[in-house]
Amino acid sequence: MVDEPGPTEWTAAPAVGVGPHPLPWPTDPHFDPELLASGDRRNVVDHYRYWRREAIVADLDARRHPFQVAIENFGHDHNIGTVVRTANAFGAASVHIVGRRRWNRRGAMVTDRYQHLHHHADVATLVEYAHGAGLVVVAVDNVSGSVPIETVDLPRNALLLFGSESEGLTPEARAAAGMTVSIAQFGSTRSINAGVAAGIAMHAWVRQHADLNRAW
Ligand SMILES: C[S@@+](CC[C@H](N)C(=O)[O-])C[C@H]1O[C@@H](n2cnc3c(N)ncnc32)[C@H](O)[C@@H]1O
């Protein structure tokens, strides 16, 4: 038998991020003296190490894609944090929460601090916003009349709208959509997790429209 260390001997995972910045410190104003002094343990790409949060948001604002994301929040949906984090990763311009104002931020892993978040009491308010902003509401759900996201051309100016885990898209959301797309499934389950579906749909947009030379 090979003598290998068991779980209790495994070493703890190394801390995320970087320690204090060696002297001399960079002087550009986007650097945060406190982070330079104590280290930067945030879950940010290396490009933003030691940057002030406002400086990161401003830099992201110049890089964000034109697509936006919305999710209906009519249950106690733990997926919203995942949606926010993924929207951040794929450079969505904004995330809209429709329905309940409160949502569980845990899955967002603090990415909500770098993302533009908006709340709408109902679908009608979201749709009013979308029309004013020149966005096409693309409902994402596997309902009758939906077209496969694998074959469809997504609009650049898409507002990808997801249903809540418990209920799926509300009739109001379905009625408001300029187009409805579904993700192909091959198993026995009726649907996939809303957070997973959101990731797939956002990445479908990325595959069609993003400039991959600008990815980190
Ligand atoms: C758990 S699903 C529920 C709805 C689903 N229509 C059903 O029949 O049970 C919650 C949300 O995840 C997304 N979703 C899950 N599976 C999907 C799929 N195959 N295609 C598109 N969206 C999906 C949709 O936004 C949906 O509203």
Image: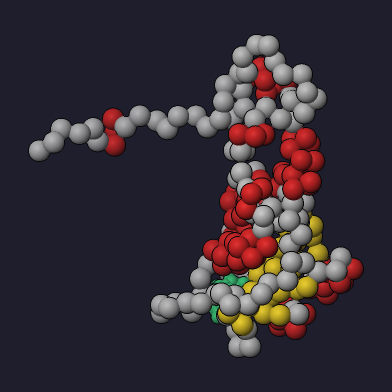
Most extreme residue toward the left is 1
Q: x and y percent of residue 174 in the render?
A: 71, 81
Tell me the residue at 65%/11% (across/down): 23
User: What residue sits 74% from the left and 44% below the top?
Assistant: 60
Quick check: 34 left or right of 144? right
Query: Image height check: is 12 above or below 121?
Result: above
Q: Position of residue 168 (x, y in %)?
A: 62, 75
Residue that sits furthest to the bottom in the current view: 144
Q: Residue at x 68, y 62 (%)?
A: 209
What count of labels does the image hold? 0
- Quarter of the picture for ligand 1? bottom right
Q: Is residue 107 above or below residue 143?
A: above
Q: Quadrant of the C terminus?
A: top right
Kindly indicate the quadrant of the structure image that contains residue 124: bottom right
Q: Position of residue 70 (x, y in %)?
A: 72, 65
The answer to whether residue 26 of the structure is visible from this angle is yes
Residue sitting at x 60%, y 66%: 204
Quarter of the image where the N terminus is located? top left
Q: How did the renderer colour the structure?
A: secondary structure
Is 167 in front, or is 126? Answer: 126
Residue at the extreme top: 23
Answer left or right for 133 relative to 16: right
